Image (spheres, rainbow, N blue to C red):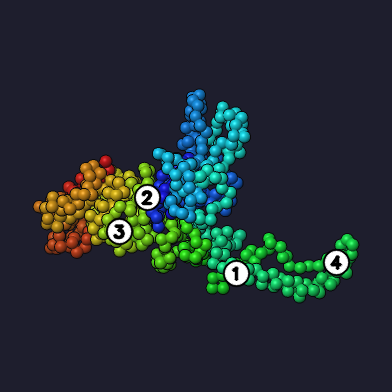
Amino acid sequence: MIKKIRIRGYRIHRDLTIYPNPKLNLIVGGNESGKSTLIEAIVLALTGRINGRSAAEELNPYWFNAADVADFIVKRAASELTRLPEIDIEIFLDNVPELQELCGAHNSNLPTEACPGVRIRCLPNPDYLAELQAWATAPTPLLPVEYYCVEWSTFADVRLTMRPRALTTAVIDARTVRSSGGVDYHLRQILGSQLEPQERASISLQYRQAKAALSESAFKTVNQRIGQLHAALHAQPIALAMDQTARTSWEESVAPHVAGVPFTMSGQGQQSAIKIALAMNRHAGHAKYVTIEEPENHLSHTSLATLLDRMGALASDDQQLFITTHSSSVLNRLGIEALQFLGPAAPVKLDELSTGIVGYFKKLPGFDTLRLVLADKIVLVEGPSDEIIFERVFVDLFGKRPMACGIDVVSMRGLSLARGLELCHRLGKKVAATRDNDGIDPTELRRPLAPWLAAGQREVFIGEVAHGHTLEPQMIHHCGEAQLRTILGIADTANLETWMTRQKTEAALRIASSSEAVTAPAYMLQAAKFIHG
């Protein structure tokens, strides 16, 4: 399995190091965080190909990290000698017997360490040294890749021209599964691997015999007529026959069908699910590494749940999966402990989470876990009414909604506050959590949360017991009963607290939409100021 991935100078990744999980890796991050680029880099180093073509054919200036190129231009403008931008992608593998031919010390590990691995580099071609020096006198952001070369090698410094047998890789991109050109290369490869050598030989023989029979029957009359034309030299007759050369093998004529419909004409969700299931099948070419881009695409909630169950059943210890996703369903169901978060800083792994929290989130498939993962700052509140009131408090204070400031207000909806804080702690997120005191001293309520709190980073805000045990009496205390009755339109004869408690969401909505000034509970004001910074 892959133990370590290091990417330098490739697209958005200037210097990225990732330590994958041995079995499953769920790669999550915001837009432009480099999820797809990471998958590309893995496939590029393992196969020497991208988009079905060799790296040398696909090499272009936009592969190179823009910051590296900009730095080079600035340094050359200052007459400072510096190396031309390069790309270096390394895959470090387990030191197992079947990978010993890839073993060597030609890698970036310090101190020097011999281990199996592959490396792909895009370097200045020494044959074009003069041209590169001329270009470097007045460099531009578009590197002259015509003067570069691609080196693909093992850590033993042995050049590779073909993917090593031990590095079988399946690539599924659920974002663009449909192809007008027919069944793509990867699907053909996966399907072809289902056949034993004897079966392939038998099919090939029967295919040739069928074409020969067609030549003898369908073309017989036509060939008799053509033979009388005497069009060839030396009176040799011309005849039509089915092509029996290697380029017309049976594989090129076979297309999978689903329920009698050609695969390429099936729905995109169906195509995606089939590709994923075939790639993960234990006999599907014995693919050691499977990359899947956004398996949730084109699938309904029910179909996605079915696919995830199938993926869970097919997952094996002999296969390493890399999956990008924007779906909390995928994250919760496949395992939050497998998450690899690509953020502005170093990647974050969640494999150190306690067993309890992992199981907890798996049992909450409806909870939007990715909101906690992807938000810049987070406010955790107990329920929908708290969320609505907090939004109003924040707008009154700062003139804009929390989301406009990169703050996501998440209703826990029964989720344990400790579980949420533990997850945010591991992610390094800034969090303001609010909760009811339920008649308990706030100091006592904070005590079990202490491992996940940090001054200035993660705080819990709780109303004073004397001001009420829940949000509703806290609002009455700070706003005053008369003002709240006006805002809510509640008659003097009705018990205000009882009505607000029974109509939590309705009361919150009326307060949020009121043009009247609202005096917020003190703990919510504190939380808003803390998270805003």
Above or below residue 419? Residue 62 is above
Mark 3 touching mark 1, by CB under 8 A? Answer: no
The mark nearer the N terminus, 2 or 4, is 4
Tell me what residue is drawn at x 59 percent, y 67 percent.
197
Mark 1 touching mark 4, by CB under 8 A? Answer: no
> Which quadrant of the structure image shows residue 385?
bottom left
Q: Nearer the viewer, residue 15 or 467?
A: 15
> On the image, numbered disc 4 is attached to which residue?
237
Tell me what residue is drawn at x 56 percent, y 36 percent.
124
Task: Say left or right for 358 vs 15.
Answer: left
Asked if residue 215 can be seen in this view, the reply is yes
| Real-space Cα separation, disc 3 to disc 1, in angstroms | 46 Å
- Label total for image: 4
Which image quarter is the C terminus in? top left
Give percent across and percent down for residue 370: 35, 54
| Real-space Cα separation, disc 2 to disc 4, in angstroms | 69 Å
Numbered disc in front, either 1 or 4: 1
| Real-space Cα separation, disc 2 to disc 3, in angstroms | 16 Å
> On the image, numbered disc 1 is attached to which residue?
198
> On the image, numbered disc 3 is attached to which residue?
358
Mark 4 touching mark 3, by CB under 8 A? Answer: no
| Real-space Cα separation, disc 4 to disc 3, in angstroms | 76 Å
Q: Nearer the viewer, residue 87 or 459?
A: 87
Q: Amino acid at mark 2?
A: Phe
Q: Amino acid at mark 1?
A: Gln
Tell me what residue is drawn at x 47 percent, y 56 percent.
289
Give percent across and percent down for residue 365: 33, 62
Q: Which mark is residue 341?
A: 2
